[in-house]
Image (cartoon, rainbow, N blue to C red):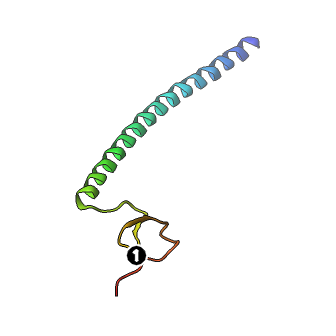
Amino acid sequence: MSEIVRDAETRILQAFYEFTESSKKRMGQMEVSDAVLVSRLGTLEDRITEVEKRLNIPPIGVVFGQSGRYSQKRLREEPLHTSG
């Protein structure tokens, strides 16, 4: 009887071990995938910044004030004034 219980325990432990190994592999693949995605996102942000510099586009959240200069205001604080 104790041999049957020991065999069952061994099979259960082996199943957990195999599950753990496959989970570790999946997590490793996800970490690599995340790192690649972060790298690609950084590249895109750099490229967009370069385009904005070339076109002289202000960053998001920067609005023109009455004087025509950039001012750091939240877009909801004050509506944009249009000439006219």
Which of 6 and 44 lies nearest the eye of the viewer? 44
Amino acid bearing label 1: Gln
Instruction: Give the x, y percent position of residue 68.
Output: 35, 72
In this rendering, would 67 be left or right of 51?
Answer: right
**In the figure, 36 relative to 21: above or below?**
below
**In the figure, 22 relative to 43: above or below?**
above
Which of 75 and 31 lies nearest the eye of the viewer? 75
Q: Residues within 10 Å of mark 1 (few under 14, many from 20)?
A: few
Q: Secondary structure at mark 1?
A: loop
In this rendering, would 49 be left or right of 60?
Answer: left
Instruction: Give the x, y percent position of residue 55.
Output: 24, 61
In this rendering, would 77 be left or right of 56?
Answer: right
What residue lies at 56% left-to-right and 26% top-to-bottom?
20
What residue lies at 59% left-to-right and 20% top-to-bottom?
14
Residue 66 sits in which quadrant?
bottom left
Q: Work out which quarter of the rendered image holds the C terminus and state it.
A: bottom left
What residue lies at 64% left-to-right and 23% top-to-bottom?
12
Instruction: Give the x, y percent position of residue 50.
Output: 26, 52
**In the figure, 54 relative to 13: above or below?**
below
Instruction: Give the x, y percent position of residue 6.
Output: 70, 14
What is the residue that sits farthest to the right in this orientation?
A: 1
What is the residue that sits farthest to the top in this orientation?
A: 3
Which of 35 and 2 lies nearest the eye of the viewer? 35
Residue 35 sits in which quadrant?
top left
What is the residue that sits farthest to the left in this orientation?
A: 54
Can you identify the residue that label 1 sits on?
Answer: 66
What residue lies at 42% left-to-right and 65% top-to-bottom?
71
What is the residue that sits farthest to the bottom in this orientation?
A: 84
In this rendering, would 39 be left or right of 77?
Answer: left
